[in-house]
Amino acid sequence: MSGITSTREMDTFPKLLLHHVAVRGGKDAMREKDLGIWQSWTWAEMKDEIFAFAGGLAALGLKRGEVLAIVGDNRPHMYWAMVAAQCLGATPVPMYQDSVAEEMQYVLDHAEARIAVVEDQEQVDKLLEIKDRCPKLETFVYEDERGMRHYDQPFLHAYGKVQEMGRDFLKKNPGFIEAEIAKTKGSDIGIMLYTSGTTGKPKGVMLSYDNVLITARNASALEGLSDAEETVAYLPMAWVGDHIFSLAQAYVCGYTVNCPESGDTLMIDLREIGPTYYFAPPRIYENLLTSVMIRMEDAAPMKRKMFNYFMDVAKTCGPQILDGKPVPFGDRFKYWLGNILVYGPLKNVLGLSRLKLAYTAGEAIGPEIFDFYRSLGINTKQLYGQTEASVFVCVQPTGAIKSDTVGLPAPEVEVKIDDNGEVLYRSPGVFVGYYKNPEGTAETKDADNWVKTGDAGFFDGDGQLKIIDRAKDVGKLTNGGMFPPKYLENKLKFFPFIKEAVAFGHERDYVTAFVNIDLEACGNWAERRGIPYSGFQDLAARGEIYDLIEECVQKVNADLKKDPMLSHCQIRRFLTLHKELDADDGELTRTRKVRRRFIAERYAAQIDALYSGVPMVKVESEVTFEDGRKGVLKADLKIRDVKGFEAAAPTETALRKTA
């Protein structure tokens, strides 16, 4: 199979589509699993589908410069809608499919979308709820016709019917699509992606075709990607990572993108496809590790003993073997045997047997989790990026990977550290600007195209970038020591029993934490020990669970004691929350990032209790149920002191780093 054959002259997605039809028209471009059966479309077939829909959008009145909203799971038809809009010179705006109606209203209204393409009845119902509040929104197109029989509004159109309209339109207007494609150039806006809104209203990030495609080409060349790759599209289409990995690099390289049937079948579908190129945020890797650990807890004693023995071998020499470094013959032999008995079968169960490259990004991954996958022989790399950078800022270099860094600047990317420790970059991927927000654009990037990341970091002795935390989140304890909450939270989340954590300590005497238990892992642990519980709230309050979480906290503290920069950040007190932190309740963003300011306000009394010495605190919190109803949960939360804590004064080096 060939490598990257496209060039910078092919500067838009539609131009690349025509290129692949000419070069590899009979090769599978996309697959989708539906009702248990994989369906495939070649590049030539995909082009016909996209052109038909583009013609239909033109018939519906979509014009150059307008916006097309897209809401749905990862489906070929949703991706085709994006490229169809681009064929006409319009800008696609994918939205998070799990957004509530009010969140969708803001984006639709702000982007001034006139036509929206949605996946199914659920998304249609959301749009119907807010249509009166979005004066520009006129037309809905739905892809899945199930449940839509009695919807007779004149502005509703089935996806297939729009394609029929498009084929008729193109018969009457031959050459229309090709002429529109030729008018578009690389400097035009190719897509608009909205930020998750961690600190306020989401911002519309305008990315040009050049931003996205030059970055995708550079990253693909760096890693040696080709049209032989297989990847799985399962992350939100509204997220820039999915846009790069499931669309941009696929169009640059010509590889195949596979859409799973649903989130529930992802692991099965992953095993059936066996991707060679894979991306997942830390949360996915954490969940996979949790499922592995739960299975091993249930395994027979002999199998559990064998697993633990060979995992110790893997930790000793697995990463060195993966990087091609010298390893003693005895260790290499034991690792070879472990690959037959443990690592190979485990990778097969996880669907990662054929992987050539696996990325993680979005937030820092715990070093222990990262090392676990690399010790299995999975070429896992961290990358550092942003929506405003078209993803790639730094990538870990092959053969010189460190679990505590995000690597070296990506091709054509410059990175520097500001006087206050903030990371800045500039590259071909730097965004054009925030839509209708020149003030925000000016605050984020300067006249020389240097972008402020908002992250605090420094370069290590090998020139690799180490991110400490969000610059605005890095605080100080009252003794002057640095307090990086996300770093501590990631160390806690390494343990399969902890799903989420929020650390506190800025301008306090010591560090404390909220902990969200992982219901599946803790429930399995409790059931094997005959511990009864009636639900999440009851289980989280059990003394046995507190003991279990305390063991995890103690292990984190033991690790922190070894770090002269962070030994003062050991956790003194914690509580387990009575409910999961939830995006629907405003506590997390749609990309599952903690909204610290919101949590600090909602749980102010509970945070104060962590520092007042009391053994218990009451809590009342509003929750949103799956059907949209709201309710109130009340609970008495126990607070646990962590015994055996030995405070260490911050070193002079640590003080200088935070000065």
Image: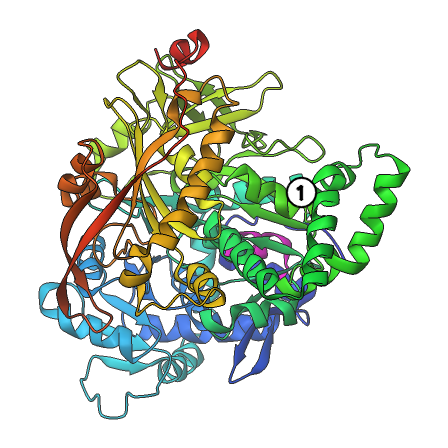
Query: Of residues 291 and 137, which is closer to you in this image?
Result: 291
Helix, strand or loop for disc 1: helix
Q: Residue at x 18, y 42 (%)?
A: 606
The picture places residue 519, in percent across and down from the top left corner, at 39, 61
Q: Is residue 252 magenta?
A: yes
Q: Position of residue 238 (x, y in %)?
A: 37, 56
Q: Is residue 136 left or right of residue 444?
A: left
The boundaries of the magenta stretch are: 247-256
Q: Is residue 114 magenta?
A: no
Q: Residue at x 41, y 17 (%)?
A: 648
* Image-based side of 194 in relation to 407, left or right: left
* Quadrant in which the N terminus is drawn: bottom right
For residue 363, say whether it is visible: no
How was this image coloured?
rainbow
Is 276 placed left or right of 295 in the picture?
A: right
Q: Is residue 93 visible?
A: yes
Q: Is residue 151 above or below residue 524?
A: below
| Residue extending furthest toward the right | 329
Provide residue 146's location: percent of width, then percent of height.
Answer: 34, 87
- Asked where in the image residue 633 lies, by quadrant, the reply is bottom left
Q: How many marks?
A: 1
Q: Quadrant of residue 126?
A: bottom left
Q: Is residue 126 above or below residue 290?
A: below
Residue at 18% in and 66% down: 137
Instruction: Classify 10 Å Cα crowding around label 1: few (below 14), some (14-19), many (20 and above).
Output: few
Residue on which the image places disc 1 = 223
What's under tag 1, amino acid-wise? Glu
Above or below residue 652? Residue 537 is below
Q: Which residue is the extreme one toward the bottom?
A: 149
Dominant secondary structure, magenta: helix
**Of residues 239 and 337, which is closer to you in this image?**
337
